[in-house]
Amino acid sequence: MTEAGLRSKPVLLKRGDAVPQNAILMQDDEVLIYQMQRLKNIQPQSEVRALNYGIYTLGACAGLSGFIIASTMRRNFKLGGLRKMLTYGPTVAVCGGLAGIVHEFNVKQSILLGKESCVTCVALRSGFYQATLGVGYTFIVSFLTCVLTAREYYTLPMPQASKGMVFLRLVRQVSPTANVLLMLGLFNMFIGASLAQKEFKLFVKYFSHSTSNDVVLNEEFLKE
């Protein structure tokens, strides 16, 4: 490595610009480490709490939706106090964790890497992920875990697998109402989209301009 390389620092190479001599393309994980360090140095930290703690909000919202769906299905399956951990665990704890993980790796990191140029697009994508995990995933998992428990303890007559229409009627019988599912879906979509929009605005404000010590970070990062 050259002496200049030993004194390396991240710089932005915009599309169409000439590549500096001895420049080394940084990997995404290197850029993320650098961006997270910049994030820690921002003062006051309350200004960037959406980037620091937003995933916990998403997890809580998805977990709340899972709790509502699981509670409704447990009541309609007449499970009483049977196997609460089996039915609540996957739909509340697991769903909440997945919501945070999916947003972290598919939305937040993409924003910090400067790969997002359309705030509406990333907001809609984030909202879709959140609604899918907060309602779609929890509905399916809650139904399956409740069905298994109801079959084992005979709390509700179970149709044969071959009786498709009867099975569909069972799904409607034990599910939350369409209005409840719609409200939960819209709520999660709004929360997911709002967080992504806030993260994008914070990126533009704190990461996409030069300072006395930093360089512009936006699209493609190089280590000079």
Image (cartoon, grey):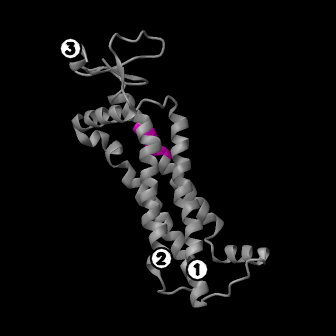
* Circle 3 SS class: helix
Is residue 209 shown to the viewer in this render? Answer: yes
Q: Is residue 20 magenta-colored?
A: no
Is residue 212 shown to the viewer in this render? Answer: no
* Circle 2 SS class: helix
Measured Cα–Cα span from mark 3 to mark 2: 60 Å
Verify CB contact (< 8 Å) between mark 1 and mark 2: yes
**Amino acid type indicated by mark 1:** Leu
Of residue 186 and residue 168, the one placed in the foreground of this image is 168
Verify CB contact (< 8 Å) between mark 3 and mark 2: no
Q: Is residue 122 left or right of residue 34?
A: right
Residue 150 is situated, as x and y percent measured from the top left of the image, at 59, 84
In the picture, residue 12 is in which quadrant? Answer: top left
| Start-end of magenta stretch | 193-199
Verify CB contact (< 8 Å) between mark 1 and mark 3: no
Dot 1 or dot 2, earlier in sequence: 2
Q: Is residue 217 left or right of residue 186?
A: left
Which residue is denoted by mark 2 in the rendering?
86
> Which of labels 1 and 3 is toward the front?
3
Which residue is denoted by mark 1 in the rendering?
148
Dot 1 or dot 3, earlier in sequence: 3
Residue 67 is situated, as x and y percent measured from the top left of the image, at 48, 70
